[in-house]
Image (spheres, rainbow, N blue to C red):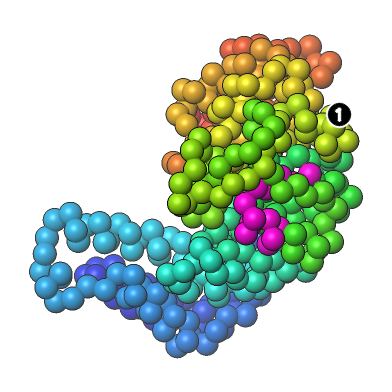
Amino acid sequence: MDTIGFLGNITLSVSTAVAENRISGGVGGITGAIPLPRPNRLIKCLVNLMMDVYTVDSYAKTRIGMQFSTKREQLMKILKKLARLPRVAAYNRDWRKYLKVPAVDADHSVETFRLRNGQVLQVKNDARFILNEIYLDRVYDMPGVSYSKLINVLDLGANVGLYATYVSSQNPTATIYCFEPSNSNYQILKYNIRRNNVNAKLYQAAVSVEKGTGFLSKQKSSVEYSLVNQPDVHTEEVQCVGLDQIFSLCGVERFDLLKIDIEGHEKILLENASDEWLLHFDHLIIEWHYSWEELERVAQRLRAIGFETEKVLLEKHMRFLRASRVYNRPDKAADPHRSSAKRVDADADKVYPT
């Protein structure tokens, strides 16, 4: 085993599997040996990555306290991510791109990733981690829900279409209705849908309480664009579709699944959605950007109208609510106090009750 030292007693080990230029792994039904670069090339990539982000000069090494401790913690996080590379390589032919530090203009650059299932996807550089969240960690999977049985899926906050392509990889016959207001994201969304023959209908619009014009803040990364009340130098004017327009616009009265990831606008959307509106969906999965207590109130409301709910905390910062309608099951009758909460460790693929 070859070992490289970083920052005192922190080391990076290169196993004999890497020395033999192959790593075995399996993700999403794909198994087998994955070719890696030659050891010296891989080591050089890792060293460049580490030192580019965490260069420590002789003066910094003499410091003690929080600065050094913080660097160690950050470095350990990077090493943890590097440990995931064999699993990334098992589904993604272009896994090596994750070794590169994103460019300064990452928000404007686009990378192409070739997946081992045959899909070819364009992703903004600052959003490439979303591929792992969806295809590797499967954050939008729901226990007891098979994508192969879904017919109509509504995707609010489609971004560049990675959730839609994932659904299509599980069920090519499902129709995904994608709403995305950002023009730059929408152009990539169109490419990804057409390039991979996804059965989807695309709408360049945000879904809000009422129909009209809205303002999309683009001050943060491309996966954090959100509707705001007033325009400024960082906003883009977008079209908004009202809640009650969705069904007539899509020509669908009932959806099998509703996925919401709209960067904070989900709270006002759900507060203004009627019970009748919510009952147009059999399953819901919502990424939540507010407190755990506020999420519980949403869960209580859904349980009161006949849903089972599950709150999920993913890696301490991503909150999800999963909800499914209960049909003709006396043992699962609607109960406003019935709930479950779990913390999911995506790296270990384990679920921990809380």
Write the residue at 89% across / 50% down.
173
Q: Return the x and y of residue 20 as percentages of the image width and height.
A: 55, 84
Q: Is residue 144 left or right of residue 348?
A: right
| In the foreground, 145 or 98 | 98
Taking the spot 49% from the left edge, 23% from the top edge, the residue there is 294
| Residue 130 image-quadrant placement | bottom right
Q: Position of residue 137 (x, y in %)?
A: 60, 51
Q: In the visual, does 122 lie left or right of 77?
A: right
Which range is magenta?
177-189
Residue 199 higher or lower than 214, as above or below: below
Side of 115 relative to 227 (left or right): right
Task: Answer with left or right where residue 105 lies relative to residue 283.
Answer: left
Q: Position of residue 313 (x, y in %)?
A: 51, 37
Is any atom of residue 115 visible in this view?
no
Is residue 213 depicted above or below 79 in this figure? above
Circle 1 is placed at which residue position?
A: 253
